[in-house]
Image (tube, rainbow, N blue to C red):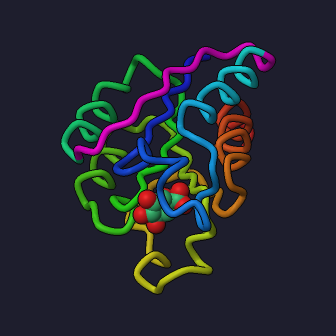
Amino acid sequence: MKILLLNGPNLNLLGQREPEIYGHTTLADIEAKVRERAAELKVQIEFRQSNLEGELVNWIQQAKGQFDVIVINAAAYTHTSIALRDAIAAGGVPTIEIHLSNVHAREEFRHKSLIAPVCRGQITGFGQKSYILGLEAAVDVKDY
Ligand code: DQA
């Protein structure tokens, strides 16, 4: 099984960025933890980050036929991007939405996810554990 794990804008700054919200863990630390768990689960993982909406759209389009599941922390694009939503809907690759923080407990503009209706489910608020939970949900996605 091949899983594509995508990260959106500003997640490259994890560790320095608003640590009171996102903690001190870097994206590289999270990637290492995800790779460890992926090895235990015997699945292949491709881990990417981009600050560019169009690049994320391209990666989602290209995932068709290449990956079994997408796990995505779309960051701020979660709340703004019809393009990401349309790419997820068009590709037909089962997609799981994840967030470090609990977006529903934060500013009102974060309560709305434009991608949620085209995702299989949403995992939000568990810090770096959201990535591990997203990976575990991805492995079993056919059972849901
Ligand atoms: C985030 C939540 C988003 O609202 C925010 O724009 C992010 C990170 C999270 O992982 O908690 O950049 O996706």
Image height of 129 relative to 93, above or below: below
Percent position of residue 38, x then y: 70, 21
Q: Does the segment drawn in magenta span residue 50?
A: yes
Percent position of residue 137, x then y: 70, 41
Q: Is residue 116 among what the camera can see?
A: no
**Taking 24 as reference, is 112 left or right?**
left
Percent position of residue 81, x then y: 27, 60
Q: In which quarter of the image is the C terminus?
A: top right
Image height of 63 relative to 12, above or below: above
Percent position of residue 55, x then y: 23, 36
Residue at left 66%, top 21%? 35
In depth, the one of 50 and 17 nearer the eye is: 17
Residue at left 33%, top 55%? 85
Question: Magenta residues, as a range?
Answer: 40-52
The picture quadrant where one finds residue 57 is: top left
Residue at left 72%, top 57%? 126
The picture quadrant where one finds residue 7 is: top left
